[in-house]
Amino acid sequence: MEWENFLHQLSNQLEGDLRWDELHRSIYATDASVYRKIPIAVAFPRTVQDIQCLVRFATEYKTSLIPRTAGTSLAGQCVGEGIVVDVSKYFTKIIAVDIKAKTVTIQPGVIRDDLNRFLEPYGLFFGPNTSTSNRCMIGGMVGNNSSGTTSIQYGVTRDKVLKLSTVLSNGDLAEFGPLSKSEFLQKAQSETFEGCLYKMLLAELSSEEVQKEIKKEFPKPEIHRRNTGYAVDALLDSEVFSTSEAPVNLCSLLCGSEGTLAITTEIVLQLDELPPIHSAMVVAHYETLRNCLNDVNKVMEHNLFSCEMMDDIILNCTKKNKKYEAYRFFVEGAPKTLLLLELRSHDPAELSLQTDALLQSLQHSAQSYSAPVLRGEEIDMAMELRKAGLGLLGNMVGDAKAVACIEDTAVALTDLPAFIGEFSDLMARYDQNAVYYAHAGAGELHLRPILNLKEARDVTFFRKITTDVAMLTKKYKGSFSGEHGDGIVRAEFLPMLIGSKNYRLLQRIKQAFDPGSILNPGKIVDAYKMDESLRYEVNRKEPEVVTKINFEDSGGILRLAEKCNGSGDCRKPATAGGTMCPSYHATLNEKDTTRARANALREVLTNPKNANAFNSDVLKEVFDLCISCKACSSECPSNVDMATAKIEFLYQYQKVHGITPSNKRFGKSSFYNKQAARFPGVSNWIFGHAWLSKQIKKWNGIAPQRKLPRISSKSFSKLYKSINNQTSTGYSVLLFVDEFSNYLESQIAVDAYELLIGLGYKVTVVDHLDSARALLSKGMLEEAKIQVDKNITFLKDLVAESTPLLGIEPSAILGFRDEYLRLTTDLPSAERITKHTFLIEEFLASEIAKGTITAKQFTSEAKKIKIHVHCHQKALSNQKVTFDLLNLPVNYNPTIIPSGCCGMAGSFGYEKEHYDLSMQIGELKLFPVLRKASQDTIIAANGTSCRHQIEDGTAKKALHPVSILRHALLPSDQIGNAL
């Protein structure tokens, strides 16, 4: 209670935000590491003055500040028991670009890839490129001295930081940058807090004995990736401390200091010109790890822009990933390891010569068995596969995971084969099949043991393995922290790695910069124990969580949540592409990420406060803005499906609290629509009447700005009686006419039916079954299960390879692939049906690919089409099938809008409390593109919610793809003439 009073006072002093509720404290308790510490609060400062205020508060009340941006650190840098200072929300400005000097001034919350998109028109870019580049922020890259795939050409973050504006631990502002010897000495004469820092460093590092000790114990200087402790060795090569003519820059010390010395508020970066535009990638395949390592020195004789390694464990993970399985196209056979070798040039002929030379070197070494050459988008796909590696490792089902502890070792290239040989022997002694994932060209290997940190035995191994590898790294005078930092997991080993004298020097530097130890304590010096404060309580009996939905594929819903390793793919902004996570794209609040939902779910289920663990206000809040787009089930490398978890939460929560009347009516909307369809004229008059529609919206919690959906003048079931005169004897299909197509947009169902008939298929209509989508969306699982079982029972003897089931509405038909398999009583029949159930675009696209359907059956009239695809299709199928369908007519010109989610998401966008967010999501990408489209451009959208959202948001009408193709279909006599 005392803290709460103090925090209230602090909150009133900040322009930014301060949160100390249970939800925010729980979701900020972890980063992408194995550690968990509950902070007392989370601050979102808006101004430098806010940060100064936080510093004064921490000093007065003897707490600490933990700086944080995207929270993707692997070593525990972002966890602590004080106040987490999240600058990712408001410190996001790109302040200035100096084209002549090739510099940019930014705030620490600028995302690396966003920065480079901004810089591209200037012909410049920021080189260091991490696997998290689409969401990691420059402030975090400075804190960790990040490197990534491009370091062999462009160096590490430390090489690019020219100036840092900071808040010191006493609240003073200080700017650090390059200084001549005279400027440094002048600074050291100042009596200010900043001046004392220069004075201390001058006294310490001028000592010949200290310099000798640093050179003796620190990693070899040719190892460019080295974050072992504070980079005092980087300061020595300057005119202040040696015969070098180079200026001294304390930014070298602050880079990699993990927020333990100062809090950064502004950064000036040195930029490079954009890389050569022409590129090729040779992917060398190896049967053994040793063969691969033997080639590294050889290939590095070439002018490579990247030299990356991944092993068969990561490759095998991609086989089960919905998104990345297709990215394996270049993998030949079953390699133990791959080397991805990228070459670039401004001249295609020169690039060809470089590629031939590299291939000849590989052929001469005879270590690899295959070396395909990739170009263009193929390179992007291969690098995306490699980037996904860290997240994919989290997709291991069960409690044993690939653990980050020894994953950041870097050695000299000449030492690499011998180091790996000893490392492999060490792993074998622990019966470990380690994961090899590496920036091989830089001598850095991300080597991960597979451990179950819920068991005391493996926690013991966690320490022993880390200790042994630290000693091995020391033997080769390597860096135990190449680019991921010391954090909690490695800081404890610094006295052994750099020697006790150097370690005491680092302690004195920390004491000088932060005498009250308020800045991220427990990292680098005076470290927390590396085997304490883990995410899980060791040897505890995990709670058994009984669910209505079957989560066996993840080992239960708790382990589904635990699959989230914190890599933060869900924090990528809308500008990065993809759909995940729409609510975060709009709010930019951590609580609206998939990661936050998984973290909160793990916390609540692991430490339940009620008999029904799901009876939690924390879960209610964190799931509120989940729009169930299902993007996390495919775009998250760990496939952390929070949309399905939300359905279970709603069901369990409503068991305790009951379901609200409006949610119940939304859940049973197909029943009400069916009743309204009996009298469509009357229903639509009521829906269109100003006062009556206002009362209906108020009664159902619908936003007043929304238009109520109109009932079709005739349901498809009624229309079908008059159009069922087919004579086709062709291939048989079942057409699933869902409740949306039947009652709300029956013409689309007619178009689908007539298109199939016109193409020669024999169509059997199934129009009496409810898909259960609305019931599922509102957590009404008892009713949904009854409907699912009813559907399976009816269809199990009808659906077969020779008679596939085709659906019109993505959210309705794709449930057969998803929730049906988790709910049904008759799983074997459901699985059999699933194999032969398709979105209508999928089926038609496959028939086009076979040549069964051809362009000659359609008009040659020219049309421009913009395609927006339903989120469930993106997650459970693919967008290309819709494109292929609309690309069939010879003069049709379709393009897919990279639109993410439209924002409607079933009833979500209708609900008054969600309306604003729904429209915000639409405005991110979809609405602006459609408003710019010419009047003659056809808008294609296959989701009923999407079409309503487009109309409400842009006043434009979208058509279902089957309607567009139906109208393009030539009459049978014209088809005959065309043939």
Image (cartoon, rainbow, N blue to C red):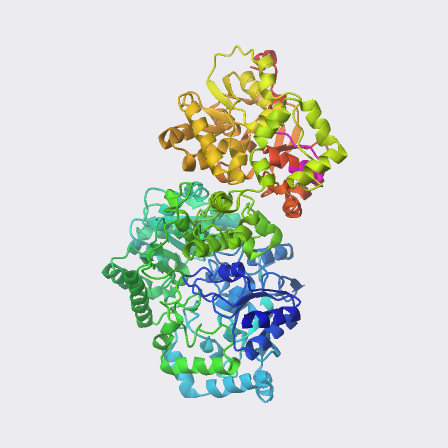
Q: Residue furthest right?
A: 690
Q: Position of residue 331 (x, y in %)?
A: 38, 43
Residue occupying the point 48% across, 29% down: 838
Depth order, front residue of 336/612? 612
Depth order, front residue of 327/836? 836
In this rendering, would 393 be left or right of 734?
A: left
User: Which quarter of the rendered picture does the C terminus lie within?
Assistant: top right
The residue range painted magenta reads 949-962
Residue occupying the point 56% across, 72% down: 263
Q: Position of residue 486 (x, y in %)?
A: 42, 69
Q: How many marks?
A: 0
Depth order, front residue of 612/79? 612
As for residue 957 lying within the magenta part, the answer is yes
**Would you say residue 289 is visible in this rendering?**
yes
As for residue 524 lying within the magenta part, the answer is no
Q: Which of the 4 image quarters holds residue 225?
A: bottom left
User: Which quarter of the rendered picture does the N terminus lie within?
Assistant: bottom right
Q: Residue furthest left?
A: 429
In this rendering, would 386 be left or right of 923?
A: left
Vertical side of 339 occupied by 9: above or below: below
Q: Position of residue 374 (x, y in %)?
A: 45, 45
Q: Which of the 4 image quarters holds residue 303?
A: bottom left
Depth order, front residue of 291/263? 263
Vertical side of 43 occupied by 750: above or below: above
**Would you say residue 905 is visible in this rendering?**
no
Q: Position of residue 258 (x, y in %)?
A: 49, 70
Vertical side of 926 occupied by 126: above or below: below
Vertical side of 142 occupied by 341: above or below: above
